[in-house]
Amino acid sequence: MRALALGVIGLCSVLGLVGCSTSGTDAPEGSGALAEPGGPAAGTRDTDSEPTTLTVLAPASLTEAFTELATQYESLYPQVRIDLSFGSSTTLAQQVAEGVQADLFASAGTDALALLPERYARGGGETTIASNELEIAVELGNPRGITGLEDFTRTDLDTVLCVQTAPCGTAADEAFRAAGLTPTPVSREIDVKATLAKVSLGEADAALVYRSDVVTSTAVDGVTIPTEHNVSLTYPLVWFNAEPHTIGFVDLITGPDGRAALEAAGFAAP
Amino acid sequence: MMTDAAQSRQRDGVPAFRRRLAGSRAPLLTLATLGMALVVLPLLGLIARTDWPGLLTHLRAPVVWPAIRLSLITTLITLGLAMLLGTPLAWLLSRATGRLATWMRALLTVPVVLPPVVGGVALLLAYGRNGLVGAPVFDALGLRIPFTPLAVVLAQLFVSLPFYVLAVEGAMRSVDPRFDHVAATLGASPTRVFLRVGLPLAAPGIAAGAALAWARALGEFGATITFAGNLTGRTQTAPLAVYVALQSDPQAAIALSIAMLAVSIAVLGLLRGRWMG
């Protein structure tokens, strides 16, 4: 635990991450609290032993990573409880705008940030924690020998894409435009999970989804898309105050353990 | 102590009792009004938010016409198949008394209570490329059922056929079996009894069942999107188009909803006027 905490501090000082540097006087103390996990050792402030609840809103794609990180943080600080709420980024941002109390908000893509009220910037901060990109999901072992985006123009294959109104559908159209291709899908599914399911159920030969969806599914294999035709999506993390544990959890997410959890879920570094 | 007669005389004579009777209707009226409002308010909302002057323009949005055409074609095929297969089934069930018939009725009720999405998954596992029936069909004929208009019809049949059979069976059961016996003793075959006795006498029930089944097929969403997918002009029926358009072109979605509402009311009105008096 100590190694972890030192690692976090090290990362903060080396990279000068927003979470460690922008939040005024509280930030170093928050990080300091991390170095003395839970114990009554010197330097621990009164507030650290008081029961605290952190409310964290995050997109569904971060479910596994954030659940693991919250458990880690709660075991470091038993007096802290982290309430996680997962959903569509747009819905969560609308909830914040309508007055739902939250300490942290992570979003898939930057579009939802525009929905946050102006006041979020006061006393908090923002950073990018991960990025995601499109990848082709194929049946295990790639039996149809799919190699790239051009296979989506073949009529002898059953390929599926997200509907144009879903973020993954917009990204797919962008990728095909960049590659100068006109895809011939048999269906445009209503969201990314429905699109992936058509391949994992064996009903379609290929689907264009996000890399994290491919990595976390045991029922499909992935075929990567060359960077020049790919479309990436960044995951911003916003925090609304500079309370020690808010900053502490931000530090954990942006630190090596956070990176490892996000990488395991298929996300690339920002 | 009073006798019953005396008690009732006293009640009749007391105006307060009448007031209480009138007053006791208020809770019923309140609940009934609330129930009616729950049904009518969303329809009013739809009508109020429609851009009437621009309705024709919105109806020309590229998503609208292919969806309406596909919905009309597939639901009419579904209705035809439901009547062709469902009427004999309803007739046999209405004349059966055994345990098998009880089980068949219970099975037919399943799609009625099943969430349509679950129905879609079940259809995929039956008719999909790896499905129980779908795999041998795909291997033998190279015919892939999901993502085709045929899948749309199968999804609609799955949810609407039970409605039809259960409604028609009810109507046929009320046809006195003595008519069948008389026809049979006069030498009519079972098929002839069905055609000449069962069908004409149950006609109003058949019309009601058909209307119900057609409306159910027209509104089918969950099983279709899960099993048939969503592709404009091929598997995107009107309800799917409404759902998708709502996120990009809300006025087109509303216009399409109004069109569906109008078509539904027109067909139900037509059926009612023609067969149900």
Image (spheres, coloured by chain):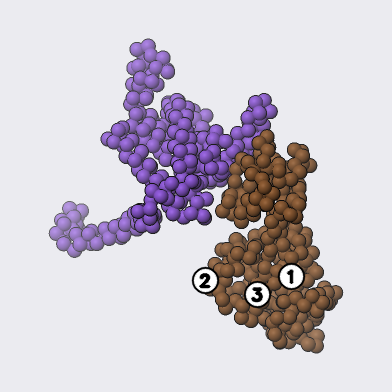
Chain colours: A brown, B purple
Q: Along the line of sight, which residue is nearer the eye, A43 or B248?
A: B248
Q: Pointer 2: what residue?
A: A98
Q: What residue type is labelled 2?
A: Glu
Residue B60 placed where, x, y %? 43, 46
Query: Quick check: B25 left or right of B58?
Result: left
> Which residue is tagged 1?
A253
Q: Distance between the residues labelled 2 and 3?
A: 17 Å
Q: Can residue A213 be seen in this view?
A: no
Q: In this view, does B189 lie above or below A20?
A: above
Q: Is mark 2 on a helix, strand or loop?
A: loop
Q: Earlier in the sequence, mark 3 or mark 1?
A: 3
The residue pinned by badge 3 equals: A239
Residue B91 picture location, percent across and down: 42, 26
Q: Which residue is drawn at 35% across and 28% down?
A: B202
Q: Out of A134 and B105, give the one closest to the viewer.
A: A134
Q: Gap between marks 3 and 1, in whole Å?
A: 12 Å
Q: Which quadrant does the N terminus of chain A fall into?
A: bottom right
Question: At which x and y percent is residue A30?
Answer: 73, 82
| Left or right relative to A101: residue B175 | left
